[in-house]
Image (spheres, rainbow, N blue to C red):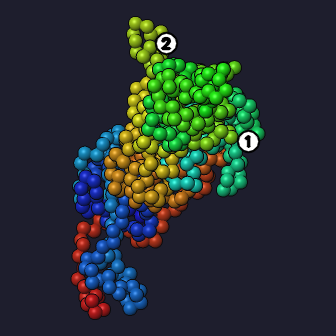
Amino acid sequence: MSMQNNGIRLIGHVTSGTIDRISVRLHVSPKSVREGTFLKIKDGEDEYLGLLTDFELNATNPKYTEGFGLGQTPDHIAKLIKGQIFSSNIIFHPSLSLYGNKVYPIRNIPEHLAPVYIASAEDIRAVFGDPSDPANFVIGTTREDKHPVCLNLDKLVQRSSGVFGASGTGKSFTVRMILAGLIHYDQASILVLDMHNEYGLDDIASDTGERVTGLKTKFPAKVRVVSVGAGTTIRGNTPDFNLEIPSSDITTGDIELLTEELGLKETTSTTLAALYTEFGQSWFKAFRMMKVGAVIPEDPTKPNSRMIPAPDSVAAWANKAGVNSIAAEGLHSKMERVFHRPYVNHKPAVNGISEVIKMLEDGKHVVLSFGDNDSDLDYMLVSNILTRRIRQAWECKTNAYRNKSTNKTGAPRPLTIVVEEAHKLLCPALANQTTFGTIAREMRKYFVTLMIIDQRPSQISSEVLSQIGTRVSSWLGDDDDIQSTLAGLPGKEALRGMLSRLRPKEEALLMGWGVSMSMPVKTRRYDSRFWKELLGNIPITSGMSATGSTPISPDTSGTPSQEVDNTDEPKPSTDKLLKGLGW
């Protein structure tokens, strides 16, 4: 067993290193620790906190590794000489200094022979916060001793965040848990753009067939489920209300956003500009009412009169506006898919977008489910229109709040917009056109942030990724996705292998703004125990997993040294033994 110091396991001592990479000689078997273990180096009153990022196996002389332990060495001799000629080292990546229970960025390194320990529950609390504080949401536990690890919810909503991971790694369950924490502790209003109808109402897990609790079920007074389109339901369930979009809310920019989806031509912008110039906000309705190919006789009194475009035709308007009629007719034909969307209405009974904004302003949370209107076109069009109006509302409220002469209210309520399949709206080609790109880059000062969810972060604009503060990533196998997830983070090379070696389920790497240092965790399970812990105030006990299982005991089969041995060379008696074996 490893040595104990006030209940903390001693595993080795410092032998060499730099401010980014410290080598530690183990006193225990390398099988008793794992990559990503949270470690502490104690050097007098100074403490250094960081992660185990790599392993090294060393020998005092490479020739000793040839044939050793292959049956030609007696067991009692092998055991005697093994600890003196072979050593196991780990690489410690220092992240923080701890002095007087205060955490500081790393500024120096410990001295030689400083002891290295597995971090304690107190160390975890000092870095990641006390789980009993409502601002700290327990997202998981350390993988070694199952100590609770927290995300700071106050910091989480101050900047945009991202939840990444390959398909099937549990991203949506992680997001459900974080959203439940934000709702329960009332940290911000939330708008979920729920493309796959997963978050609002109860669902059935595709892989296990088990019931998955929706946010509406647990927070019926706080969560509103809105379905896109008049009369639409969500898997047979009636939403709180149906969203219809006034045609006057559709801008020419919304259509240009759909260039790839609709297969639009380079002439589109010219035609759209001419439409808006003539009809203003009514351009969409006016263009929809025009007819393609409609003609009338130039002179109705003559039987063989030449045919000309009818007054209500696209061609007639195009000729009048000085626009290419063929291009205008082509645009009209391609926009038929938008003209006849069931949620677009010239005069809806209720302005659904205004209703959604009012709910968010009043502290409610909205899950916008797309129901059967879940094509990429629907998702891109509705999401962009809604978020553009939200942006305008929050900018107006923030400017009024900052105007001291007219300010009669407090700051706007923080708002987090959750975006699934984020690469569809934030790819490099569209990020500068969509409202989402603007929110990611500029809206933090207006109290609006994004939470983007994606399995292919490499397809998201690098400019947008640079604005992502807190990142929670499950396993990723693609090198480009790993590189994009870690972009801009300190020590990303050390984290790269760690991210690629996470277990496919129930493990994640925490990084960025919402945590004091990067940390791999065993994520909590989204089950009945989670809800009891969140709503019933049942604490997550240190030393127990989030699922209630007992902690994994480390492998202590290696015999630890009871004294720090500063000698790397084998002792003379061992040399004689080796020579006797023909080495």
Seen in the picture, residue 489 relative to 320 is either above or below; the reply is below
Depth check, front residue: 95 or 315:
315
Depth check, front residue: 80 or 444:
444
Q: Residue furthest right?
A: 236
Q: Residue at x 33, y 72 (%)?
A: 57
- Indicate left or right for 226 with 325 as reference: right
Residue 235: which disc? 1
Residue 301 picture quarter: top right
Q: Residue at x 57, y 51 (%)?
A: 170
- Indicate left or right for 318 with 428 as reference: right
Q: Position of residue 325 (x, y in %)?
A: 51, 31
- Indicate left or right for 526 with 238 as reference: left
Residue type (three-letter) at the residue carrying disc 1: Arg
Seen in the picture, residue 358 relative to 417 is either above or below; the reply is above
Q: Would residue 253 be visible to someone looking at this image?
A: no
Q: Position of residue 136 (x, y in %)?
A: 50, 37
Graded by Cα atoms within 10 Å as few (under 14), some (14 to 19) or many (20 or more), the crowding at tag 1 reads few
Residue 72 picture quarter: bottom left
Residue type (three-letter) at the residue carrying disc 2: Thr
Going from the N terminus, do you reach mark 2 or mark 1 first? 1
For mark 2, give the secondary structure. loop
Quickly name the residue at label 2. Answer: 409
Seen in the picture, residue 409 relative to 160 is either above or below; the reply is above
